[in-house]
Amino acid sequence: MKELFLVKPNKKYQKSFENYALAYKKINDEFYFDKYKKALESFQDYLNDLHNYSQGNDLPQGEVATSTFWLIDKKEVVGVVRIRHQEVECAGHIGYDISPDYRTRGYGFQILKLALNEAVNIGIDEAILTCNITNIASKKIIEKNNGKLLGTIFDEEENEYLYKYSIALTDS
């Protein structure tokens, strides 16, 4: 895990990212597979979309500018983190996922830790994160990264309760 780093999505990791997307298909996780399947159809279009979204251009309706990074370990994409440049109700600033093939190995903690540094570069002073109250792994990851529980909220769109956390990124 010494070699872990975040990169902006790029062609160098195309094959690895395609395997990443297929890992979700393999376990029938439609939510994440749908998020990544465009990369299997046209990788360059997918990269262009991510670049545009990071600049606040051509955003899907209701979306905010979002920078995406891939967590790389030994030349493999093992995780994806999305940093929203503004807090989004029921989603916060940061969302991340770890490939089903690489879970329970500490990557969740590392991807969030690295993403918090990127959030500072984007200009976020206090990161807001949410997780489903049944997602014990994500709860632990956020708390291990100094997340302070703000309370419980209800996401009407997903019809679920979420924990809402804050992580201070600056000393002010």
Image (cartoon, rainbow, N blue to C red):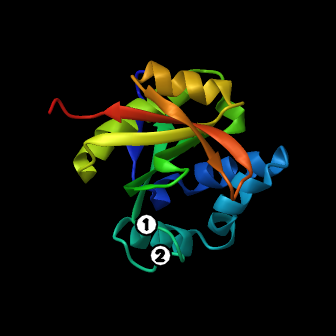
Instruction: Estimate the x, y position of residue 115 in percent, counting from the top left.
Output: 39, 40
* Distance (Cα) linking label 2 and label 1: 7 Å
Label 2 Cα neighbours within 10 Å, binned few <14 / some 14-19 / many ≥20 = some
The number of callouts visible is: 2
Could you tell which of marks 2 and 1 lies nearer the N-terminus? 2
Q: Is residue 54 left or right of residue 74?
A: left
Which residue is outermost to the bottom? 58
Residue at the extreme left of the image, as rendered: 172
Q: Secondary structure at mark 2?
A: loop
Q: Is residue 164 visible?
A: yes
Query: Which residue is located at x 47 percent, y 66 percent?
Result: 50
User: Which residue is located at x 41 percent, y 27 percent?
Assistant: 3
Q: Dividing the picture into quarters, in which one does residue 9 lie?
A: bottom left
Q: Which residue is mark 2?
A: 59
Measured from the top left, where is residue 76 in percent x and y? 55, 40
Q: According to the image, label 1 marks what residue?
A: 64
Q: Position of residue 11 (x, y in %)?
A: 48, 61
The amino acid at mark 2 is Leu
Q: Position of residue 47 (x, y in %)?
A: 49, 67
Classify 146 as above or below 111: above
- Say whether marks 2 and 1 touch (CB < 8 Å): yes
Q: Is residue 24 left or right of residue 153?
A: right
Helix or strand or loop: what does disc 1 sit on?
Answer: loop
Q: Is residue 122 above or below residue 136?
A: below
| Residue located 59% across and 30% down the image | 138
